[in-house]
Image (cartoon, rainbow, N blue to C red):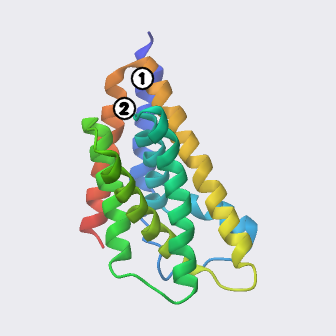
């Protein structure tokens, strides 16, 4: 196995995640169409890493949870979004978003297996917070298109995270743990800088 390309890819990834400014999204302006929704999960490091980490986490589970984690996330992403657009805003949304990056990273790094109810509860809590952040930003007549866009992109990022996990396991099992530690480190930074 050639380690040089893997090391270069890892270095490029670390450079990317440490050079992008963290955007705890509440208060930033956002468009409200499908295109804006599709792009939005890529616009902040917190959301991007959380979506990938959810895919990683799901890929580590048994078959039922491999499906239930991303499905639960998307459903509660919608719940949080529509709560926010309806004027119901939960406290500490930005802290919960940063904590989602930290906790998911730690779960991946340690490969801990949580009981199914704990897994789905954390998934729902984190998703609701991410949905709240998206809902707090949207304006205009295309709320449903924006929601369809960011939920689609989030699902694609989950699948991407699952694929990255599977690929990392074929290269070396430790790579997934290293990625989890890197994600947790970024989550710690985000939590400390809110």
Q: Name the residue located 57 percent from the left edge and 41 percent from the top edge.
A: 159
Figure check: 144 above or below 55:
below
Figure check: 175 above or below 129:
above
| Closer-to-camera residue (101/126) | 126
Location of the C terminus (image quadrant): bottom left
Determine crowd level at label 2: few under 14, some 14-19, many 20+ residues with C-alpha closer than 10 A: many
Residue 56 visible in this rendered orientation of the protein: yes
Q: Name the residue located 33 percent from the left edge and 40 percent from the top edge.
A: 108
Residue 6 x %, y %: 44, 24
Residue 111 x %, y %: 28, 35
Q: Name the residue that disc number 1 marks.
A: 169
The answer to whether mark 1 and mark 2 are in CB contact below 8 A is: yes
Number of marks in picture: 2
| Closer-to-camera residue (81/30) | 81
Residue 73 x %, y %: 50, 57
Q: Splitting the image into 4 quarters, where does residue 149 fall?
A: bottom right
Residue 118, disc: none
Q: Name the residue located 40 percent from the left edge and 56 percent from the top edge.
A: 123
Residue 1 x %, y %: 44, 9
Q: Name the residue that disc number 2 marks.
A: 176
- Give the alpha-carbon distance from disc 1 to disc 2, as whole Å: 7 Å
Answer with left or right where residue 92 lies relative to residue 75.
left
């Amino acid at each position: 196995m050639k380690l040089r390309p893997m090391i270069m890819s890892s270095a490029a990834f670390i450079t990317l995640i440490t050079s992008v400014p963290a955007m705890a999204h509440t208060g930033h302006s956002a468009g409200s169409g499908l295109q804006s929704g599709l792009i939005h999960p890529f616009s902040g490091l917190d959301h991007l890493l959380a979506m990938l980490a959810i895919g990683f986490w799901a890929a580590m589970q048994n078959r039922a949870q491999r499906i239930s984690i991303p499905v639960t996330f998307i459903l509660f992403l919608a719940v949080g979004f529509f709560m926010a657009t309806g004027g119901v805003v939960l406290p500490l949304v930005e802290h919960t978003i940063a904590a989602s990056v930290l906790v998911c990273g730690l779960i991946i790094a340690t490969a801990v297996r949580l009981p199914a109810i704990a897994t789905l509860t954390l998934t729902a809590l984190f998703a609701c917070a991410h949905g709240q952040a998206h809902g707090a930003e949207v304006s205009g007549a295309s709320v449903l298109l924006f929601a369809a866009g960011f939920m689609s992109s989030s699902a694609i990022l989950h699948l991407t995270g699952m694929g990255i996990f599977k690929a990392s396991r074929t290269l070396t099992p430790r790579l997934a743990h290293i990625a989890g530690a890197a994600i947790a480190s970024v989550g710690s930074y985000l939590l400390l800088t809110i």
